[in-house]
Amino acid sequence: MAVPIVMPKLGMVMTEGTIAKLSKNAGDSVARGEVIAEIETEKLNYDLEATEAGIFHPVVTEGAIVQVDGVVGYLLAEGEDPPKIEDLIATKSAEPHKSFPTTAQQRESAAPEVRVRSTPGARKLSAKLEVDISKVTPTGPGGRVVEEDVRKFKVQGSPDALGSAGPVLPSGLPSPAKTVAITGMRKSIADHMRGSIASTAQLSFVLEIDVTDAQQMRDEVSKDKDAVITMAHVMIKACVDTIKDNPGHNSVLVDGNIIQFDEVNIGVAVALKEGLIVPVLKGADKKNILEISDGTYALAVKAREGTLSPDEVSGGTFTISVLGTVDGFTPILNASQNAILGVGRVVKKPIVKDDQMVIREMITVSLTVDHQAIDGAVAAAFLGRLKEILEHPGSLFK
């Protein structure tokens, strides 16, 4: 029986992938585990391996864009013919459909039941926005309506309402010098950020911390160990140690459940020319600061080369975003995570210490939490403990 080769979902926000290269030709014998195609997504490149042995029969060409769970090709037995298109269509049309009436439809009890293939999130959003989901043009995997389709329909009337004329600008604006479509990684980031804001109760807390001693110790250890230890590495280690006393921040919110973890997987935001990516340093709670330095450096190199694996961009339980050019900012939560720390630049400032005016190196941190899972007092306790650790940094460098 033909084994379908499908486009894998390589991250929570991925909806499609590009076939950058077919590593096997049609008719080639393929062993289980052999690479059959190279996939390119908004975030990474990925080698697609055969799940079974068989004769490779691709149904797409290089450069094709395939939706998640869409068919790339088949693995056939010796002498077996690939499925016919009409058979695939018949199978697809025979799949059961479910009815998901909107709020408006529920109020109109006499209206006929409309059967629409859609995701749970799209159905929930359509009910909230009072959108007739049967009129929404689907763009999701398998012809399903996804949340983005519902949002576009609510704003525009249909996903293609703008047509080829381009965006309609508010009156009074000058002629545009340039128009850039939001696509690729930028679209992925936009969808991710908008979805995060829409599905969480985000609240940020800001605190200024004296890192003079931490900076001095960082310099000393870097020279002594011939290593590159940055303030970002110090912040990661400090957050890991803070989480030990505040485990509620090392959690995710899924289907109304707050799920805490003992292992700390730190997502570290890395800026690329195309946008932002967040590789994950797994098991950060088991690493010393030198291991954190080595691990984050390796991830950053892979991020810039586009060689991160799916495992290296998933599984984060807490995120840190460092912007060394601004004093402070309020970061947006990553999907399902309940906390993210924004870290600003280190600045020398006059402060009062022991009733004396002194110059110290200060840093501003911003903790954003999902208030559904973390209360203000709990977030304040996290920042208080983080401040204590950073201002007495000896334990960070053991």
Image (tube, rainbow, N blue to C red):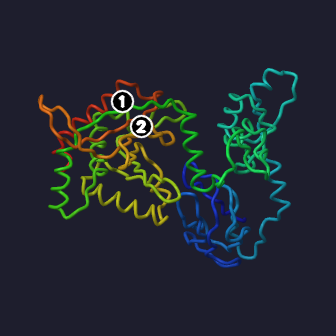
Residue type pointed to by label 1: Ala
Separation of residues labelled 1 and 2 (CA atoms): 9 Å
At x 48%, y 61%, the residue is 309
At x 38%, y 48%, the residue is 323
Q: Position of residue 303 (x, y in %)?
A: 45, 61
> Are the residues tagged 1 and 2 within 8 Å (C-beta)?
yes
Tell me the element at label 1.
helix
Tell me the element at label 2.
strand
Tell me the residue that label 1 is attached to.
379
Mark 2 closeness class: few <14, some 14–19, many ≥20 residues within 10 Å? many
Is residue 382 shown to the viewer in this render? yes
Foreground pick, 362 / 191:
362
From what the image shows, is residue 363 above or below residue 300? above
Is residue 398 shown to the viewer in this render? no
Foreground pick, 298 / 178:
178
Q: Using the image, tell me which numbered label, if any, was put on residue 66.
A: none
Q: Using the image, tell me which numbered label, if any, was put on residue 339.
A: 2
At x 67%, y 33%, the residue is 125
- Where residue 301 sits, quadrant-wise, is bottom left
Of the numbered discs 1 and 2, the one sitting upstream in the chain is 2
Q: Position of residue 370 (x, y in %)?
A: 46, 32
Left or right relative to 54: residue 356: left
Q: Position of residue 185 (x, y in %)?
A: 57, 55
At x 56%, y 44%, the residue is 192
Residue type pointed to by label 2: Ala
